[in-house]
Image (cartoon, rainbow, N blue to C red):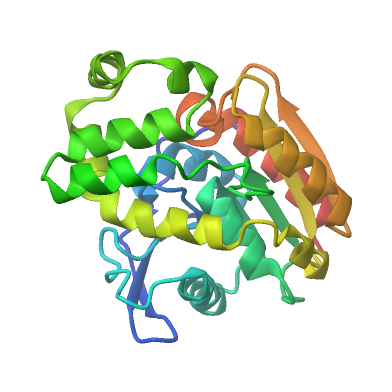
Amino acid sequence: MTHSNTNIPIDPSPTVRSADGTAIGYLTVGAGQGVLVIPGALSTADDYAAFARALAARFTVHTIERRGRGRSGPQGDAYGMEKERQDVLAVLRETGARFLVGHSYGGLVALEAARDNPALAGVAVYEPGVSIGGSIAMDWVPDYERALAAGRPFDAFVAFTRGTGPARARAAPPWLMKIMLRLFLRAEERRRMLAMLPENLREHREVARLDGSYGNYRAVAASVLLMYGGKSGIAWVDTAMERLAAVLPYSETRGFPALDHFGIDKKAPVEVAGAVGEYFLGVSP
């Protein structure tokens, strides 16, 4: 079983240039075969430090700082999934990593980067943000945009959380959600997330644009571990797991009954890293 090791140092973030010249940073920890971790929306590479350190007991783990964050350059006016794919490919070329891990929106990026990419040996995605028939709601966007335009980022964050979260979040009135978010998120965490709200909107527009395109993942030659939390309570997750398992040529599904959507980064990163490590060792060339 993989164990977390807080004594494993994380190298200072190097950068590579993506196809459009944008600087893309990443953090590196560990030794062994290379793994690239792709964070989700409203997240940075630092949010996956515990997961990376746990996986680093067996692998060299690189966590990309997706564009619009940290030492990486801005998303840019021409932002789209192709930019994210090019960023991932640039880091893969630089590091020689042959394994990908993606969470939520990062899982969608991982699947897109894995299409027609024979260099990859394995991919692991935790509740990838794959929308099918409008399963990932976008009805929160008008309120979100109005709040951002009015200079009320926390209200925009509330609209997003209610619109995309589990049923209990969608049912909560805005005033209650505001109280809950202030209680459950540290002030610094809220500050970082609020700063990424414009990037979050562009990313979710890509989720909507790619709605129903999951059939494209028949072109993923790597073995794929599909992971989900049993307590996520998010309706689109079950549909995505089912459809992806049907189209991916080589896949295995793994549930974590006690975890929710944030099992990989916040709730149980060591447990999830253990499962990912075992899977990658099983498909290692």
Asked which quadrant contains residue 99, the reply is: bottom right
| The C terminus, quarter of image | bottom right
Residue 135 visible in the picture: yes
Give the x, y percent position of residue 254: 77, 34
Relative to 226, say whether 13 is above or below: below
Identify the residue shown where x is 42% and y is 48%.
Answer: 41
Give the x, y percent position of residue 278: 75, 42
Give the x, y percent position of residue 219: 80, 70
Front one among 9 and 34: 34
Give the x, y percent position of residue 55: 58, 44
Using residue 284 as the reference point, say whether residue 54 is left or right of it: left
Identify the residue shown where x is 51% and y is 69%.
Answer: 81
Residue 27 visible in the picture: no
Q: Residue furthest left?
A: 151
| The N terminus, quarter of image | top right
Relative to 105, say whether 182 is above or below: above
Relative to 149, say whether 140 is above or below: above
Front one among 158 and 98: 158
